[in-house]
Image: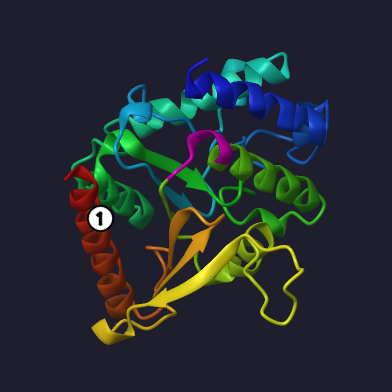
Amino acid sequence: MDLNQQLTTRYIAALEATDRDFIGTLNAYRPVPGKGLNDIFFPTVPANYAAASRKVMVMGRETRTWNYAVATNPRSLAEYVTCGMEKHASYRDSEHCLHSKTHGSGLIRLLKAVGKATGAAGLIYSNLFAVAHKGKDPRKNLAAWPHVRKLSEALLNIQIEILRPDVIVFANGIDSAAIRREFFPHADPDDPKALQRCTGSHNWKSDGIATGHLWGFMLDDRIQCYRLQHPSARFHQSNATKAREQLIKLLSKNNQATAS
């Protein structure tokens, strides 16, 4: 199986493990289309992803109005996952995303910049939350959130395991930092036996960039990670822009070193 086929199989298994009738559960929290929960975000990768020399996952928070089930009317989990993956691949490669001349979304602009720096073939467009609520933070849907949280963590772990990114850019923003730390707990020096996936720490204070705007660490002792503000955040815009520019320089430099 190629990587997207492996993702399909694992996505279906994750939905079955969460709730075998997940489509019914999902619909229960959105009484009419566009109201309540949106459809699930299932990342895919380009056909030539496996051959990419540098694989970089850019992780936003959630999509806006990601609705596809109404038009496709899937009758099974397998059909639903296939529809969602086709939606992701179609959007990623469209003139509204990576092939756009400009874009109103700061996250898509970041995706484009990272793809230019490291190669679009190795780019993974992902999200911390697999489902949005009315195109916004799913935590607002208190009844559905436990389901969404469990599924989001499961899907992210599947993507990381199968796609094995070299770099992850966490662009989720401060507001969802607590959830990111739950999914990817950092080492606790006071409790060495505690579950940990993230270790080390690096900052760019010497370049005039505060840790709150750009911070580096390692995930699973293998993946170089960078955490920065969500590109759409209005918090200290000039400093956030400087941090993103620094990130692109780091990625470009590392990509050149890998290529040589």
x, y percentage for residue 199?
A: 55, 67
Which residue type carries mark 1? Asn
On whether residue 162 falls in the magenta region, the answer is: yes
Q: Is residue 56 left or right of residue 200?
A: left
- The stretch of residues the image draws in magenta is 161-165
Quarter of the image with the C terminus in it: top left
Residue at image point 71% right, 42% down: 151
**Relative to 245, is 152 on the left or the right?**
right
Q: Position of residue 171 (x, y in %)?
A: 44, 60
Q: Secondary structure at mark 1?
A: helix
Q: Residue at x 72, y 15 (%)?
A: 76
- Label the magenta part by its dominant secondary structure: helix
**Which of the two residues, 51 or 38, is positioned nearer the viewer here?**
51
Q: Do we see residue 199 in this rendering?
A: yes
Is 50 part of what is drawn in magenta?
Answer: no
Q: Is residue 26 left or right of residue 118?
A: right
Q: Residue at x 77, y 69 (%)?
A: 193
| Number of marks in picture | 1
Q: Which residue is mark 1?
A: 254
Residue at the (76%, 68%) spot, across then down: 194
| Position of 14 relative to 6 (above/below) | below
Q: Could you say where residue 245 lies in the image, as x and y percent from the top left?
A: 23, 66
- Between 208 and 93, which is closer to the camera in this rendering? 208
Q: Position of residue 91 (x, y in %)?
A: 39, 31
Residue 25 location, quadrant: top right
Q: Residues within 10 Å of mark 1 (few under 14, many from 20)?
A: some
Residue 36: in sight, yes or no? no
Q: Is residue 138 left or right of residue 52?
A: right
